[in-house]
Amino acid sequence: MLVFVQSAPSQLDGPFYAQLATRTRQFVVLYLNGGREDRHVIDPELGFTPIFPSFDGTYPALALAAEEDGGIAAAIDCIRQWRPTHVVMQDQTWKGKLKIALACRAIEARAIVRSDKNYISARARTLPLRWLEGCFVKAGFGNLAPVSPLTANYYCWRDQTTIWPFPYPSSEAKFARNESYNEHRYAERERLGIARDTLVYLSVAKFVDRENPQAVIKAFARVRKNHANTRLVLVGAGSLECALRNACEVLRIEDSVVFTGYLPYEKLHLAFWMSDVFVHLANNEPWGGSAQDALVARMGLITSSKVGAGVCHLAGNLSRFVVDADDIAGASKVMSELASNPASLAAFAPAWGAVRAGYTAESLAGWWADRVICAPTANAYGDNSLCGLQ
């Protein structure tokens, strides 16, 4: 049995749990959210509370007190009572995770922590501090579940038997093209006054300096000079909105830029389906789930070198689509390359396939069900040495 300990329902992890439940019922999710099914904390960058999907009741879950109100102790009580084989921790404070890890050792359960490079984009640690941090994580927990190979490489982790995949997954069921794709694609374009044959760049970002939407506008302004049949769609909200609108007027591209405002997650896929190229030039974006969603939707992708998903997925020949956050000329160059030859979007096919194979809720649920819970189909992946259930 697995126990997942999470602070609150998430649009990223919820689809994973729902998919896992279609394969096995040998798990339960403990939400340390005070019994609330929604997120109710105001996002300081947006200035309001984001609208998250409603709780998915298709998988086994139990709501406990929030961490600051004794949720860790309540989770430990459940773990001691149920005696699971594995406990996966995410989103808690390091102190809370270590308490759970110690409780796991007492009952010989395997403690797994999802470790991601949350601060690498903002400040890369020097090698001694990085090494100490990596040792701390390895010593405190039985296994590691990094978000991507970037994490393992950053910490110089080489022992792959203790590193399990647990990225921030995209929902293939939501973002992949289906039989209604074209209908929705052209209906959304018509609603926004965008012609069918226009190349559409999409940015989904908070309008704050950290996500750097002003760079996308500046790069698009350069593209627009030579490629009139292009549009930029900006999905988001934040304190910079007035400044961004003014910038469009100064650059004389206001008629080619569409501001949609904030879109809740339940409608977000429609923006992806109507667009062709996702552009995210963030100054600091440790992962960037929307950039990954764009690849599931079979879009082109251009990101800054501070976007983890971009660096991870745009490898090899696609690495030229990763630019520095302040490199406006470099961003406009690759944006223009795709505008000159829209058929070149097919070059992203390797990234589309790689994401769908290992970074979606569906593929990830299959891996965990087969390799961790050790369902009978585990042999399809080979050796079961990671299971710890022999």
Image: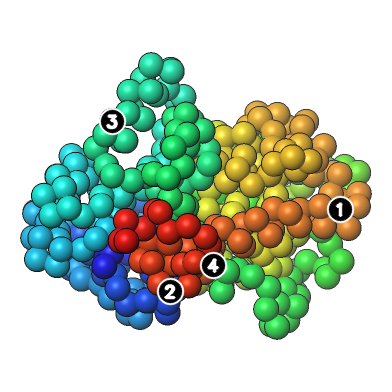
Q: Is residue 382 left or right of residue 312?
A: left
Is the Cβ of the residue at disc 4 closer than 8 Å to that at disc 1? no
Q: Can you tell which mark lies on residue 376?
A: 2
Q: Position of residue 247 (x, y in %)?
A: 67, 40
Q: Is residue 386 left or right of residue 316?
A: left
- From the viewer's perspective, is residue 136 above or below residue 185? above
**Quadrant of image for the N terminus:** bottom left
Residue depicted at 43% across the width and 50% down the height: 164
Q: Amino acid at mark 1?
A: Ser
Q: Is residue 217 visible?
A: no
Residue depicted at 64% across the width and 70% down the height: 176
Residue 221 in which image quadrant: top right
Q: Earlier in the sequence, mark 4 or mark 3?
A: 3
- From the viewer's perspective, is residue 205 above or below residue 5? above
Q: Amino acid at mark 2?
A: Pro
Find the distance from the CA under tag 4 to the CA under tag 2.
Answer: 9 Å
Q: Amino acid at mark 4?
A: Ala
Residue at the spot of label 3: 136
- Local SS, label 1: helix
Q: Earlier in the sequence, mark 3 or mark 1?
A: 3
Residue at the spot of label 4: 380
Q: Is residue 35 left or right of residue 292?
A: left
Residue at the spot of label 1: 344
